[in-house]
Image (cartoon, rainbow, N blue to C red):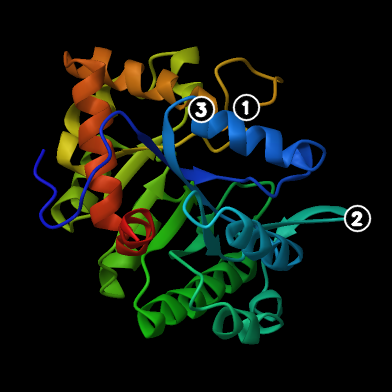
Amino acid sequence: MPVGKVRWMAGGYVDCHCHITAEEFLEDTDDIIIKSRKDGIQALVCVTEHAAEFERLVHLSERFPDFVMPCLGIHPIQTTAAGQRSVMVKDVEAVLPEFDKYKDSLVAIGEIGLDFTPWLAPSSEQREQQLKAFQMQLDIAKRLDLPINVHSRSAGRQTIAFLKEQGAQKVLLHNFAGRPSVALEGVQAGYFFSFPPAIVRNDQRAKLIKQIPLENLCLETDSPSLGPTKQERNIPSNIGISCRYIASVKGLPPELVCEATASNALRLFPRVAHKLNS
């Protein structure tokens, strides 16, 4: 696929959504990063879920500047000592200075979005707080001219409608599980969609993937979650599994899907392209 002025390194995947600062990677982070590079990945676009990850991710990106590409964001579901709860505006307000502190290091804002899972956000007040937290972080992305890495569980239609309402342009909807008709509204808006290796566990996403044009698809692992085998730690090196599944569904060679999705990723995340080319 044409990449415009962006140089693409042949044979390299781009993992557009992974959690390299997750607890599951704390003991062997460097090993995972080194293995990822050896296994044909040219960049890890790494997201955060809560403020405690911010500094660690930026420091990792400084140690691996041409490979670990940091996104900072507050996830719509927060994990605390008492369990999981829906995000509140104060969670974002507490870290607003951090976005400006690290703005020159970032390739995107994320993971942000909406999660209307009934047992996690059962009330209208909680959902309203999520929308406000989402809005605040969309405003940061606009101000810093950064793409957004978006979560949309049990809220695909609401998320895409809100993004369009806000005029969001450079958008990745990760692990999208909404209806194909809703996804195509995102396609029409120019949004991108990525899917983790867990798609091989069943064919629930096949119809969706078949209808999304290749020009709007990216690859992700969402590691350490959503791997090919449930309950096992997922790693970025599993990205080839996503690639081969998408290729199979679309009747295309995996090499073409790898090349196309990498090209899409570099268009979506211009700072990743710049870091790879510098």
Which is more foreground, mark 2 or mark 3? 3
Question: Which is nearer the N-term, disc 2 or disc 1?
Answer: 2
In the rendered image, residue 127, in percent from the top left (x then y), is placed at 57, 65
Q: Are marks 2 and 1 in contact (CB under 8 Å)?
A: no
In the rendered image, residue 107, in percent from the top left (x then y), is placed at 43, 64
Count residues near mark 3 (Cα–Cα under 10 Å), then give few for <14, some for 14-19, many for 20+: few
Work out whether 245 lies above or below 153: above
Label 2, label 1: how far apart the Cα atoms are: 24 Å
Disc sitting over residue 38 in the figure: 3
In the rendered image, residue 141, in percent from the top left (x then y), is placed at 41, 75
Between 12 and 268, the residue placed more toward the observer is: 12
Label 3, label 1: how far apart the Cα atoms are: 17 Å
Which amino acid, by three-letter code, is at mark 3? Lys
Which amino acid, by three-letter code, is at mark 2? Ala
Question: Which is nearer the N-term, disc 3 or disc 1?
Answer: 3
Disc sitting over residue 124 in the figure: none
Disc sitting over residue 81 in the figure: 2
In the rendered image, residue 137, in percent from the top left (x then y), is placed at 50, 75
Which amino acid, by three-letter code, is at mark 1? Asn
- Residue with the mark numbered 1: 234
Question: Which is nearer the N-term, disc 2 or disc 3?
Answer: 3
